Image (cartoon, grey):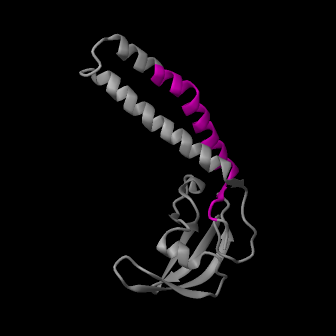
């Protein structure tokens, strides 16, 4: 099985996340701090909607900065090996409950602007197929209680 803590990203997706992190931790953080200071100068903080809104925005921004920092710490830029194994960064073709599906196995950040559905390694389907090879048959337990059969028919590196 692939290391679930590593996120495969295309160079484009990596650059986009890095630019977002730089914006949020630089100019946008300073802008929020200025809004908080301006609202604080208005006086009574209990009934100051602008102050509370800016503080809430600051909390969301700091959370996103932490999230991006962690993602970029555990990132692998490029594509996984084309070895026919299902691992993050692969476009998987599988027959799921009798229907053929094509999807990206990995993270939404990796997907960028593609139309492919994305399944993470921690989803029920993802956990069942992670590390499997082309031709493998497995199943996963769906939230409705049914066992869903899956057959891997293809696995190629995602090219963005």
Residue 88, given in percent of the width and then of the height, sits at 63, 66
Bounds of the magenta segment? 4-33
Instruction: Determine if the magenta segment contains residue 155.
Output: no
Quarter of the view holding residue 42: top left
Is 6 contained in the magenta span? yes
Q: Residue at x 76, y 68 (%)?
A: 81
Corner quadrant of residue 58: top left
Q: Is residue 147 above or below residue 102?
A: below
Up the image or down, 85 lies above or below 151; here it is: above
Q: Residue at x 50, y 75 (%)?
A: 125
Residue 27: give x, y in percent of width and height.
56, 24
Position of the C terminus, as image quadrant, is: bottom right
For the stretch drawn in magenta, the main secondary structure is helix
Q: Nearer the viewer, residue 51 or 89?
A: 51
Q: Nearer the viewer, residue 89 or 53?
A: 53
Q: Residue at x 61, y 69 (%)?
A: 91
């Amino acid at each position: 099985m692939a290391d679930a803590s590593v996120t495969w990203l295309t160079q484009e997706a990596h650059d986009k996340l890095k630019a977002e992190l730089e914006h949020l931790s630089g100019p946008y953080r300073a802008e929020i701090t200025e809004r908080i200071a301006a609202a604080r100068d208005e006086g009574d903080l209990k009934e100051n909607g602008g102050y509370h809104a800016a503080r809430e925005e600051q909390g969301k921004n700091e959370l996103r900065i932490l999230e991006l920092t962690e993602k970029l710490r555990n990132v692998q830029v490029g594509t996984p090996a084309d070895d026919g194994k299902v691992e993050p960064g692969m476009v998987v073709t599988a027959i799921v409950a009798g229907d053929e599906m094509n999807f990206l196995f990995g993270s939404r950040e990796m997907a960028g602007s593609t139309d492919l559905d994305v399944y993470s390694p921690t989803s029920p389907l993802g956990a069942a197929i992670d590390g499997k090879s082309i031709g493998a048959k497995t199943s996963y337990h769906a939230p409705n209680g049914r066992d869903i059969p899956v057959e891997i028919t293809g696995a190629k590196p995602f090219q963005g």
